Amino acid sequence: MRKAIVVLIIVMLVVVATVGIFLLQGPDVPERELAEQINVNGNTYEVGITPYFNGYEGIRTDGPLMHGLTYRIRPSLGSNPISDRLYSSAGTGSTNQPYGLYSYSPADGRKLWTFNTQSQICTKTTVNNFGNQTNPSEANLRLFFGCDDGALFVLRDGYIETIAFAPAGSNVWSYQLDGKAVEHIAIHDLRGNGFDNSDMFFAGTTNGTLYAFNGPISEYNPITGLYNNTQPTLAWANHISDWPLTSPTVSDDGKHVFVGSRNGLLYGFDAVTGIEIFEWGGPYRVSDNYWSTSPVAVGTPVKIYASTGDGLIHCIWGSNGTAVSGWTHLEDKLAVNGYQLKKPKAKIDGGNLTNICATPDDNFVMVGSDTGYVYSMSTLDISQSFVFDTRIHTQKTQVNVIPKYDGIFSQSVFIVARHLNNTDTDPSDDFSLLYQLASPANSTVTWRLAVDGVVLGSPAVLSMSRRWPADVLFSTVSYDQNGTASAGRLYSFDARAELIPIESNAIPGFDLLTISIATIAALAIMKIPRKKR
């Protein structure tokens, strides 16, 4: 009799636990994807992220989006302008998927228009509104990109429209470069005058030539009494090197432009005349080896940051081309230009680095490495603020995408890691992990998402007027076993994660520990000998 009672107690405990867990878990919530478990102040949480578009599956695009996403901010008379258009190069060159610039709606992922090109676009699309940032009647938006056949395009995209149309006619300008443009087109926007000849844009090419262009000239038409805008014009072109160039960078005041060559040299030029900066006394040597990243100019007085293929970050004065004090490392007990990044336990990271991401206040610079680490450096005391490891166990991982600092909505850092899935030679099963870190000074993970395929560009963080001020949008590329890009997908997720306590799935007083203790106690009762009467 006693054994039957004990068994009944155990069964009741198990039933109550099962029913309680089911009730507390509630119904399935398909719109939420649990991507990670993190520990905050000793408590474990699941990270809930709300997806948009087609949920976690995303939206299939017209071929792979090879250079990530860029976007425009629609001017608004209110105080909260939002993004209403995404841009990316896509297409496979087929009749159904021609090469070109594709525009998508960030609200639902719909394709809005396609601007066809004769060859594949080889740069990221630079987007800038040269008009008023808050008045839609004064919008003057331009899109800059280059193609494999050497064509450089500047498009004007409209704002006042009921149906989106691809730019055409006088809204399209092109120029044939000697070689194809590299990475992205750099611009200097002299605010307040629209897109005119006081504005400039620059392109570095694979044939070693740096091009500078002026914006359109406003010419008075006496017949109509109006000012007509001409097309952009070539300001100058310098053949700098027999090596391919990096993408150029422009000082904040627009007076100087800086560009590197792949053989490790950095050059500085007067932006208006194209003459080398006299005080430099010649180029600055960034690397003794092949240099594959592009410099970035920040602040006043201007400093140029450059990362290398052997784990070094250089910081150079834009005024005279000399290294900023403190950005050195020791070789044979001698101070050598370039700060050497180090992994945990002071191990040197000699990997290939991404381009530099610098915060607008020039207090931090961030960079990724193909060793799987991401670094944030304080420029105030020239020290590593954090080292973040994106690897999963011993799996080979690369960070090839420049970290993204969101200084508008969250002041956080978004990074992308590519996991090779233990098959270095077969990219068809590669996958990506996207992380949101608390800040450039704090590597606490606040958001993490795993997706199939490879993310090739930094995610876009946009205002979409949803339940939180920002969304995270990005695209992936799928490869076949031979390394050919075969397909692409577009994703959108809420930029804020919901921390869901793991303990919420347990029944108060009836968790597994409680059940185990009760079971052991019941079995112990069974072994207590009965008193003889």
Image (tube, grey):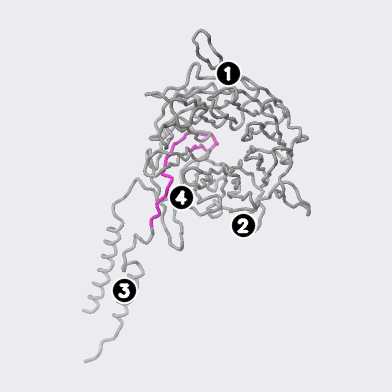
Q: Which residue is mark 4?
A: 447
Q: Quadrant of residue 104?
A: top left
Q: Residues within 10 Å of mark 1 (few under 14, many from 20)?
A: some
- The image shows residue 78, relative to residue 195, as above or below, that is below
Q: Tell me the CA gap for discs 2 and 3.
A: 46 Å
Q: Tell me the CA gap for discs 2 and 1.
A: 55 Å
Which of disc 3 and disc 1 is earlier in sequence?
1
Q: Tell me the CA gap for discs 2 and 4.
A: 23 Å
Which amino acid type is shown beneath numbered disc 3?
Ala
Which of 430/74 is in front? 74
- The image shows residue 440, relative to residue 11, as above or below, that is above
- Determine if residue 124 is in view: yes
Which of disc 1 and disc 2 is earlier in sequence?
1
Q: Is residue 510 left or right of residue 249?
A: left
Which of disc 4 and disc 1 is earlier in sequence?
1
Q: Which residue is mark 3?
A: 518
Which of disc 3 and disc 2 is earlier in sequence?
2
Span of residues in magenta = 475-500
